[in-house]
Amino acid sequence: MIRRLTAGVPARALFLLGALLVGLLVAPLFAGDYVLTVLILILYFAYTGQAWNIMMGFAGQLSLGHALYVGLGAYTAAALYVHFGLGPWIGLLVAIPVAAVTGAFIGFLAFRFRVAGVYFAILTIAFAEFARVGFDHFGWTNASSGLFLPVAQYTHNDLWQLRGHPVMFYYVLLAATVLAFVFCRALLKSRIGYFWLAIREDEEAARSSGIDTFHYKMIAVVISAAMTSFAGVVYAFYYNNLFPEQVFNISRSIDIILGPIAGGIGTLFGPILGGFLIEILGEGLRSLLESFGIDVPGIKQVVFGVILLLVVVAMPDGVWPWLARKLGLTERQK
Amino acid sequence: MPFDVYLNVAVSGVLTGLVYGLMALGLSVIFGVVRVVNFAHGEMMTVAMYIAVTLFSALHLDPLVMLVPIAAVLFAFGYVLQAGLINPFITRPEHSQFLLLVAIAIILVNGLLIAFGPSAQNVQVAYAFDSFQLGWLIIDATKAYAALAAVAVSAALFVFFRSTTLGTSIRACADNYTGALVVGLNVKRLYALTFALGAACVGAAGPMLLLIFDVTPAAGPAYTLLAFVIVITGGLGSMPGALVGGVLIGLTEAMAGLVFTPSAKSMFAFAILVLVLLFRPQGIMGKRTA
């Protein structure tokens, strides 16, 4: 199994990956509260970006509504916790089917009727927006006044209830990111992965060579939605408050996809690198502006937009393919 | 509720919908020809709205009078944007174009935030509370004028595309890119012109809509989404479809606001979108393509 997953990967790449993992494992020992918060966000976006990448990067289906699955996961787990006292891991067992079924429903609607490309992207936005307005009027989850989880004292870490210090959330997200990375590698090296790439490159050709494209696109949506819902559960228990206006907002969906696009769509390391790039860029920008005493709301986003623009113009494939070539980490072709 | 209340709300929804239609027309024209989805469409419209707000508060110029110069400003903006930034992207994958326009949208939204602050702004024209009475039908003057202006601008655009050489050349680019190149059309320039025209649509629709709604910097993304919903409902690339879609969505939102609650109105617009995608994916007026 391990041999199959690492076949063709240069030893240097494995070494660097291991070094990065060790670095991330020991990081909380040296990181202050601020750095830890940033690291948590990086891992959150690395994980959700990886999940999104399955749909877009592997199967070629552009989803612009992944906030929907985050929100469903967050709301399912939080509502079960608030109303029935069920812990997050039981909540997760409910959240995953909820998100997966929703993903399957959207996929079914779209792929049955050959809604593709831009149309599919807008359908995903529409469902996320539908959920946003719907939850704004859904009394069971407190509608637009927001759902609050009882805030815990950080006296001890309770992994079972996901109540505790941010360090615990950091390790939960780190584990999720590592598992997602390995899982995606396994998917990509499996039969399904090759079928996805075939669909992404040329759907008509894939269909004519006998691939059931509907079936495999559905698998991509369901896996991606299910994985994303886990991020939602963690989100709910980390922030302890949920507002439909924030959770389901289209900007959240865009936040999720910026990382993998900047890092490199369809690459395994792209979402992780993208998470680092986007967060470090954003935070660096903020502190830079602060050090100049500039405190105008919106200025950070404008500079961010300009940088994004430059990256898109100069590096359309993302940063990772370029970086991998520079570092000599490109995978050997069989 | 008496029947005439429904009718009054329906008429006001249709009038607002015509302005929506003009806004969506811009998106439809751009997508139909350039094949780029303008994810910064609503943001561009809020820029036009803020220009109108500024002109009104500084010089007391009526938004409907300033419609043409504002549209001209947006026209120039659209031309430069397409010629300078988007033209190199027309052969790139969709997500790449998407990201480019998202970046532009982020810059516009937050640029407006820096310039004008987060609070809602509007214009108080002299005829803000006037209305026309037709039997038991009461029509707001602002909505009637805005809708009339929207129809006039749309009609001008239809005539341009049907009857002028330039309009026909642009349609040729849309029908057959290679063919247009072969007969010697300057496709890049025509693309820039098309994007400029699409931008001019929101340049005109913005001041009209300002008579009906307030504007905030954050309204941009919501208008972008609304324009998408309308264009897909009406049929991507179909010009009459954009207007029909606009009226349908305007009507739906108005009725949903009356029967349910105004804050839930966009949910019904999205429900219509889902139904259309389900049963008529090419849109109400769209042609089925293989």
Image (cartoon, grey):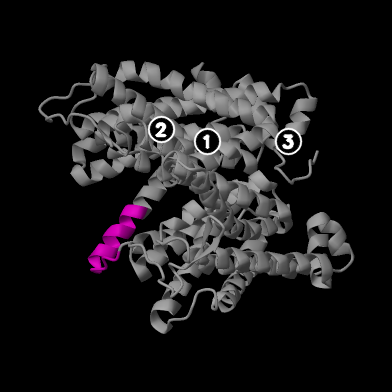
Residue at horizontal 52%, vertical 27%? A103
Q: Do pointers 1 and 3 mark residues of a single chain?
A: yes
Mark 3 crowdedness (10 Å alpha carbons): few <14, some 14-19, many ≥20: few
**Contact, mark 1 vs mark 2 (Cβ under 8 Å):** no
Q: Residue B79 location, x and y as percent?
A: 64, 71
Classify the position of the C terminus of chain B by image quarter: top right
Q: Which residue is mark 2?
A: A70
Which one is closest to the eye, mark 1 or mark 2? 2
Residue at horizontal 43%, vertical 67%? B129
| Camera sees residue A214 | yes
Mark 2 crowdedness (10 Å alpha carbons): few <14, some 14-19, many ≥20: many
Identify the element where label 2 is drawn: helix
Q: Which residues are magenta?
A: A282-296
Main SS of the magenta part reads: helix
Q: Does the segment drawn in magenta span residue A291? A: yes
Answer above or below: position of A94 versus B279.
above
Q: Does the segment drawn in magenta span residue A139? A: no
Separation (CA) of disc 1 from disc 2: 15 Å
Q: Amino acid at mark 2?
A: Val
Q: Which residue is mark 1?
A: A53
Q: Which residue is mark 3?
A: A202
